[in-house]
Amino acid sequence: AQSVTQLGSHVSVSEGALVLLRCNYSSSVPPYLFWYVQFPNQGLQLLLKYTTGATLVKGINGFEAEFKKSETSFHLTKPSAHMSDAAEYFCAVDTGGFKTIFGAGTRLFVKA
Amino acid sequence: DGGITQSPKYLFRKEGQNVTLSCEQNLNHDAMYWYRQDPGQGLRLIYYSQIVNDFQKGDIAEGYSVSREKKESFPLTVTSAQKNPTAFYLCASSKDRGRTGELFFGEGSRLTVL
């Protein structure tokens, strides 16, 4: 069965520090992979996606992620955290069949 | 601007009442979805629709119903049969009928059962 695991329900970093949010997936077919961000009481918005081609994907607001097939991972990084990055982040996988499967989410806290 | 509009944003319901959450999109997308979000559980798919007059159950359809009479609209009814309806409900759409691709989300509706 397809699944998404996000390691760490909460991550705390200092402003200016590296952000690393971990995501591992399982899929029996080549996956489409996504990272979404959610601010309080709002919907989700797309940060970046991997479908085919280049495995390092750049998204909005300085975020990027690398698809590593051998590790079944799609970790999200940002070199320098900003206070405005504080939000909940969701990794998701689409394996076809109209079902996008979401991870449980990781809440990012940014300390001044 | 194109987007998805959900209403109401907040809704309170007494036990035993049905409530309907509205979802309208002007993105001209074929596919629409309803997700339920609970703390620490991510998003779970309730129903989805690939085309007008057609919809399919997702992973947690029990106690919910939907209709898709127009391309732009995909309302969700939370019935009294839903045992634990208090949650944040998100409507989404996608352009492609094939693989889901990017999902576009509304702002959500928070339902509280008193």
Image (tube, coloured by chain):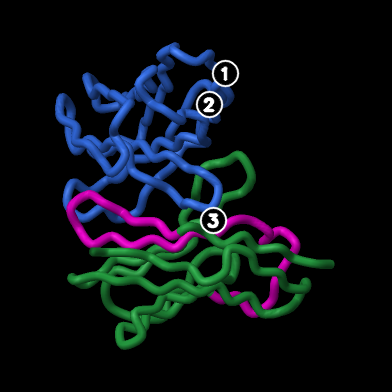
Chain colours: A green, B blue
Q: Label 1: few (<14), some or many (≥20) within 10 Å?
A: few
Horizontal arrangement in the rendering, residue B8 relative to residue A11 (left or right): left
Observer-side mark, 3 or 1, equals 1
Location of residue A23 in the rendering, given as x and y in whole percent from the top left corner? 45, 72
Q: Amino acid at mark 3?
A: Val
Q: Amino acid at mark 1?
A: Phe
Residue range highlighted in magenta: A77-103
Q: Label 3: few (<14), some or many (≥20) within 10 Å?
A: many
Residue A21 vertical placement versus A89 (above, below):
below
Location of residue A74 in the rendering, given as x and y in whole percent from the top left corner? 42, 75
Chain for mark 2? B
Location of residue A64 in the rendering, given as x and y in whole percent from the top left corner? 50, 74
Please give the name of the residue rendered at 39% of the width and 40% of the height, measured from the top-left corner.
Answer: B35
Q: Work out which residue is located at the far front of the displayed protein and give it.
A: B83
Q: Marks 2 and 1: in contact by CB < 8 Å?
A: yes
Residue named by callout 2: B111
Residue named by callout 1: B12
Observer-side mark, 2 or 3, equals 2
